[in-house]
Image: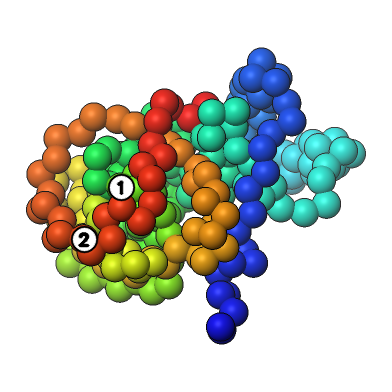
């Protein structure tokens, strides 16, 4: 049997901290990350004098040294909460401790019965064409959303390929994204998505092929959960699936 290229890249460990300690860590490091996120926006838009910019630079460098006084050597990876919730704090889209992550806090991605959705605030840090969101940022967001939607429907997988159609520019500001499972065939999942601007105009459509790694299927591993949220479902109903019972429904209470 040919090796599964996705199998070696999936590894989840459970946290060793108590629920109380987890909350304290999340509160402290989440606040730190939000402050850095605000700093990124301020740095981008500031027009202070060059002397002031130099002084601020020295202060930031000093703060960086303080943070690196005790830091892990590599990436954060994946950790599971006590109830199976995913703690992907380094994730570039939804990581609590990643300052470029945009799907955090009130903008988090939520699961519904057959997919996932989010309402994001994409400001100047995510600019591509003048006044518009960079197309690569949209691709980044939808790539994550495809995986969230598949897991929400009880058919988790990892992206093997995706296709995006950019219908019109996406203005900076409020952006709404949604994705749903269209078809399941064994370990393969076809997921579709759409992106809308603040006025409800369709700006991007997407489709992805996700594949469930064999090792995850064989281990019957727990796939990370997300907080469910009721949304008005205006999307087309999915096509009938040939393997709708190949995985148990692992959705549950909100992950913390």
Q: Name the spot of residue 13 as percent of width and height, x first.
A: 67, 44
Find residue 92 and name its label.
none
| 253 shown above or below 4 | above
Residue 36 seen in render: no
Q: Secondary structure at mark 2?
A: loop
| Nearer to us in this view, 243 or 120 | 243
Indicate the quadrant where residue 142 lies: bottom left
The percent coordinates of residue 236 (x first, y second) are: 10, 53
Q: Residues within 10 Å of mark 1 (few under 14, many from 20)?
A: many
| Residue contact at pointers 2 and 1, CB within 8 angstroms | no
* Quarter of the image where one finds residue 254: top left
Residue at the image point whose x is 30% and y is 30% from the top: 229
From the viewer's perspective, is the residue at label 2 or at label 1 nearer? Answer: 2
In the image, is residue 52 above or below residue 166? above
Q: Whole-Å distance between the Cαs marked 2 and 1?
A: 12 Å
Q: Earlier in the sequence, mark 2 or mark 1?
A: 1
The residue positioned 52% from the left and 44% from the top of the image is 222
Horizontal side of residue 11 vs 170, given as left or right: right
| Residue at the spot 49% in from the left edge and 46% down from the top edge | 223
Residue 79 image position (x, y, % from top left): 64, 41
As rendered, which of 72 and 112 lies closer to the eye? 112
Residue 241, numbered circle: 2
Q: Residue furthest bottom?
A: 2
- Quadrant in which the N terminus is drawn: bottom right
Q: Is residue 75 left or right of residue 30?
A: right
Helix, strand or loop under label 1: loop
Give me the residue at 69% from left, 34% from top: 15
Q: Which mark is residue 153?
A: 1
| Residue 88 % position (x, y) | 58, 44
Q: Is residue 245 above or below residue 1?
A: above
């Amino acid at each position: 049997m040919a090796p599964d290229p996705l199998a070696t890249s999936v590894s989840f460990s459970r946290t060793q901290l108590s629920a109380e300690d987890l909350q304290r860590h999340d509160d402290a490091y989440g606040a730190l990350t939000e402050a850095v996120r605000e700093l990124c926006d301020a740095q981008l838009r500031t027009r202070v004098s060059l002397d002031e910019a130099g002084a601020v630079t020295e202060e930031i460098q000093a703060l960086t040294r303080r943070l690196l006084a005790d830091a892990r050597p590599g990436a954060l990876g994946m950790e599971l909460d006590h109830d199976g919730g995913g703690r992907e704090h380094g994730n570039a889209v939804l990581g609590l401790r990643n300052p470029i992550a945009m799907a955090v806090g009130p903008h988090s991605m939520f699961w519904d019965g057959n997919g996932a959705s989010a309402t994001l605030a994409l400001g100047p840090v995510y600019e591509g064409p003048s006044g518009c969101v960079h197309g690569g940022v949209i691709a980044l967001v939808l790539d994550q959303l495809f995986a969230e939607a598949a897991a929400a429907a009880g058919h988790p997988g990892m992206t093997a390929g995706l296709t995006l159609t950019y219908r019109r520019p996406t203005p900076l500001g409020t952006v709404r994204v949604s994705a749903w499972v269209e078809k399941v065939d064994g370990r393969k999942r076809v997921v579709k998505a759409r992106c809308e601007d603040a006025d409800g105009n369709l700006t991007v459509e997407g489709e992805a092929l996700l594949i469930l790694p064999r090792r995850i299927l064989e281990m019957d591993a727990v796939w990370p959960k997300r907080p469910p949220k009721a949304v008005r479902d205006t999307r087309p109903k999915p096509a009938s699936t040939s393997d709708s019972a190949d995985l148990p429904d692992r959705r549950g209470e909100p992950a913390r």
